[in-house]
Amino acid sequence: MDKKIIEVDQVVIKFAGDSGDGMQLTGTQFSNTSALIGDDVSTFPDYPAEIRAPQGTVGGVSGFQLNFGKKVNTPGDFPDVLVAMNPAALKANIGWVKDGATIIIDTDSFTDKNFAKAGCDTEKLKEIYNDYNVIEAPITSLTKESLKDTELDAKSKARSKNMFALGMVYCIFDRPLDHSVKFFEKKFAKKPEIAEANKKVLKDGFNYAVTIHAMPSFRVHSSTIEKGVYRNINGNTATSWGLLAAAEKANLPFFLGSYPITPASEILVEIEKRRDLGAKAFQAEDEIGGITTSIGAAFAGHLAATSTSGPGLALKSEALGLAVITELPLVVVNVQRGGPSTGLPTKTEQSDLFQALFGRNGESPVPVIAASTPSNCFNYAFEAAKIALEHMTPVLLLTDGFIANGTEPWKIPSMKDMPEINTQFIGKDEKEYLPYLRDKNMVRKWAVPGMKGFEHRIGGLEKMEITGNVSYIPENHEAMSIERDEKIKLIANNIPELKVEGNEDADVLVVGWGSTYGHLTTAVREMNEAGTKVAHAHFNYINPLPKNTAEVLSKYKEIIVFELNLGQFAKYLRMMHPTNHYEYYDKVQGLPLTVKEIKTKVNQILEQL
Amino acid sequence: MADTKYNFKDFKSDQEIRWCPGCGDIAILMSVQKAMAALDYDKEDYAVISGIGCSSRFPYYMNTYGFHGIHGRAGVLASGVKVANPKLSVWQITGDGDGLAIGGNHFIHEIRRNIDLNIILFNNQIYGLTKGQYSPTSLFGQVTKSSPYGTIEQPFHPGELVIGARGKFFARTIDNKVADTTEILIEADKHKGASVVEILQNCVIYNNGAHSAITSKETRDDNQIWLKHGEPMIFGKEKNKGLVLDGLNLKVVTIGENGVTKDDILVHDAHQELPYIHLALINMAVADGFPVAFGIIRSVEAPTYEILLEEQIKEVQSRSKIKNVDDLLHSGNTWNVD
């Protein structure tokens, strides 16, 4: 092989194998090591809904894609390097790798039997040798050989083959082994023989790559990042921590009522661990129990939240309406996935926007905000709680499978720099408590059981203005409906204005919301760098919209709304700001956007101008 | 605990009661108010939580913290309140529709978790608020608005469900027996854990007389047995009937007949862990020649969820290095960029 060194800003690697091959761990190790040596990293785990789909089949392929280097905002469109542990992994991914990509295959698993399982043709495979830089390695047998003197059983030996592949890739990209070595020592502290085996296989993989000269063929330019303490974080952890941060800042105990659902379960799991911070996580018997225990906890004076995904949000709708009419603070996190119904549980989508905005009976306005990167889930979870507590309302926070599972390095914030949260408790010295007496923001006060003298009743029946007694008076119902609506609209005074990135003076404005940020900002940056003027406005606040939305949108000849659904946000913008023309770019494949398709669409619109 | 002594009137709210004249709920309201006045809490530490149905209007008539929820969800709403603040005395007001049909799932789980709630189940064997459809406790064959040819469903026995969910406290009473009910409610509150009190409640409009075989003046002495822990299971107008074990089954006997003496009669043990006799007592029915059991049938001590949670929090806090969110953010793998 030629020793040609390619200098690049970013490299995309995908590890792919059977769902039991440990590809998620392999990818995570590579990401963490790269982040530790100062690269930007963005990751995209992509796994099947089945826990262990039939071995060797395309349906059972689990992948972990990551992008590292400089100015990284996405996990990358197409891999430069594919590690395929079997024919199925190759078949599932070959259509998505870059032209001329490097493909590392475990030749031991490229047997006729496995080709048959993957449903592919051996002859066809040979064609890849012409089009790609294929590195063949008998990974399974070399791993067995590497461990032949250990006491491990055959199964455990075979299971270590992912570390052989990782060692090879570390060599190719000139990464140090110490981070993974330390990881094994810590993880297997009680099973030193396993730790040793993993270390040995990793080193042997590294050395094998040196031997076959599969060595540094890329030199990746490191990022110049801000000073500070960093860590890797995924969106679900960031969401959990953002909620805990808000509780601490507001000086309130935290309660999470939740029910396991992909891809949101990690939020429940993380909060369950946080007994050390006094957090009360309650795994309910169903989704309705999840939200309703939280409403109970909110009534009792906690910062309360519930976490779910689309089908779970549907089940919670009625209770969410109860939180609307009782005007209690509550954060509802919806980690979106492909729908409708069970849909694509492990795949990403932005198709719950309408459900979030409109999916309840009656006039039932709820603030909706969306996080846009794995790490800013922390900020938007914090913000959701702040809005809930300051405006006495349930708030819906939308994330999705892509940013919930994806990771990136994150400069750790300090709690002292987080904004203050002003809870709306009634003052202890007040003479009386009128549950629905509103302030200038239309916000009612919060009195909780245990507070002397403020005993009162709330509930799902319409309430009389000010007193909160049950009321069937027609004019009162209308007045209360308008007040609840007005209260949410007034939140616009307390959220940041919409910013324009890229070239503000462009004719075309690229619009997105939520998790498409990384792909859109990368496409827009690259186009501007290449001399094409493009602007980008990204929405994190959806209801209410930022106050300057109309002003921003009206500046551009063409607005293209990119989203992972059939145009829900574009339709919403058309409803809220009907005078503009909106061009749609929709994708509903359970996959994120690619930078390439964004550029193609923008160019196509520019040509028509 | 309390610095004030209350009268039951202190627990009346200023809202007009909108239940039908003669509704059994009105007497239950008084029993709850009397029980709260007799208990040790400060008024602001009571929370009355309901779902939907006639009985669920209850919180509006109480001058305490109250929450009228949504259909079937009283159990989870109350669970959230109690788990959040274990110091409160939390009363869940529910009916046979709210608690056993739409809210059946929550009912069994709150009992299984043994959250310290007073679950007051108003059983009138009908849907009242929606005007007379059959409920999960309506009798087999009962003709109602939604079963014009008679139901073809077997009813739940609430107590049997409680035992099935591994419940620790079950009592049964009758709406208009205010003194007995008050006493039972006080005991239900004192019992730590999920305490279910089934109240046979008469719906005067849609199911009037549903319980009359048990409650009518003529038959009540022979058709009711009021159980007291540690006392023999004796009943009847002449106080000469009792319950004995015949093999594995309960049997009604008459003291003084066939050589039966008072010493042969079973002594009620509400505290025994094994639920078999409690279950047999719960299932006694007039149609089978038995009196219906009232009073505290089962009361067994067991750890409660909200206390176990608080203990676990303390235990984890004592050994965790993470004391605040800054610690959390810096836990695990971090690195410095200089």
Image: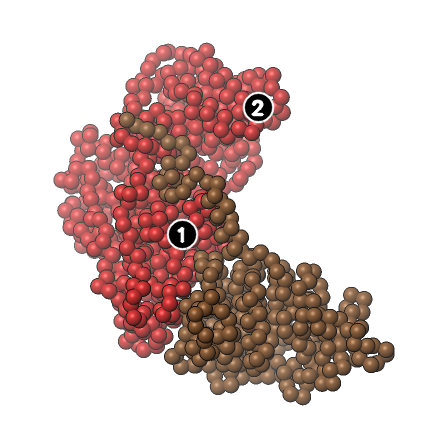
Quadrant assignment, res A66: top left
Q: Which kind of residue does numbered mark 1 sit on?
A: Phe
**Counting residues from the N terminus, which is met first, the one under dot 1 or under dot 2?**
2
Above or below: residue A395 compared with residue A174: below
Front: mark 1 or 2: 1
- Name the residue beneath numbered marker 1: A254
Which chain appears brown?
Answer: B
- Name the residue beneath numbered marker 2: A193
Q: Residue at x 55, y 57 (%)?
A: B304
Q: Which kind of residue does numbered mark 2 sit on?
A: Glu
Depth check: give the residue in front, B40 or A355. B40
Percent position of residue A277, x then y: 42, 46
Q: Residue at x 52, y 41 (%)?
A: A50
Depth check: give the residue in front, A478 or A100. A478
Q: Are marks 1 and 2 in contact (CB under 8 Å)?
A: no
Dot 1 lies on which element? Answer: strand
Quadrant assignment, res A362: bottom left
Depth check: give the residue in front, A544 or B310. B310
Colour scheme:
by chain
Percent position of residue B317, x then y: 46, 44
Quadrant assignment, res B163: bottom right
Residue A164 in sight:
no
Mark 1, chain letter? A
Separation of residues labelled 1 and 2 (CA atoms): 41 Å
Which chain appears red?
Answer: A
Percent position of residue B114, x then y: 56, 59
Q: Residue at x 46, y 46 (%)?
A: A275
